[in-house]
Image (cartoon, grey):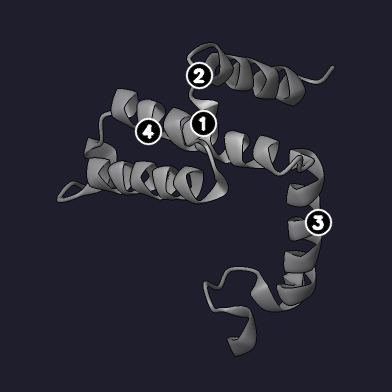
Amino acid sequence: MSELSDLRTIIAEFSRDRDWEQFHDGKNLAIALSIEASELLEAFLWKEAGEVKIEKIKEELADIFNYAILIADKYDLDIRQIVLDKLARNAEKYPIDKAKGTAKKYNEL
């Protein structure tokens, strides 16, 4: 079993043990993920990048990862594969010779 599968199992068991699955429909998980992403943004609010508290960043990223993994688990998605598929699509949209060193969106390259 891969480390990602192990993590997925641990997170799912944590929720199951607390009977939280009843609250974990796709909509609520997506909302929770969005809220946690906003809390990550809040850690940067009014600060220079170097002023952020790393412990706060780690805490919020962990929450984001937890909810993202729960969503993948809910819909029985292969996390590794969906990430690789997205990278492949992005590679087509952002070829190195056009995208290297620029922050332009693919339709502006």
**Of label 3 and label 2, which has the lower sequence position?**
2
Q: Which residue is mark 1?
A: 22
Q: Quadrant of the C terminus?
A: bottom right
Residue type at tag 4: Glu
Distance from label 1 to label 2 (Cα)?
7 Å
Q: Which residue is drawn at the image coordinates 81% and 56% (left, top)?
A: 85
Badge 1 marks a residue whose secondary structure is helix
**Of label 4 and label 3, which has the lower sequence position?**
4
The answer to whether the residue labelled 4 contacts the one labelled 2, judged by CB atoms less than 8 Å apart, is: no
Q: Which residue is mark 2?
A: 19
Give residue 53's quadrant in the image.
top left
**Of label 4 and label 2, which has the lower sequence position?**
2
Please identify, in this view, whether the residue under mark 1 or under mark 3 is nearer the observer: 1
Nearer to us in this view, 72 or 21: 21
Tell me: 27 left or right of 101.
Answer: left
Question: Residue 46 at x, y = what percent?
Answer: 14, 51
Residue 60 numbered mark, or none: 4
Distance from label 4 to label 2 (Cα)?
23 Å
**Of label 1 and label 4, which has the lower sequence position?**
1
Residue type at tag 2: Asp
Residue 85 numbered mark, or none: 3
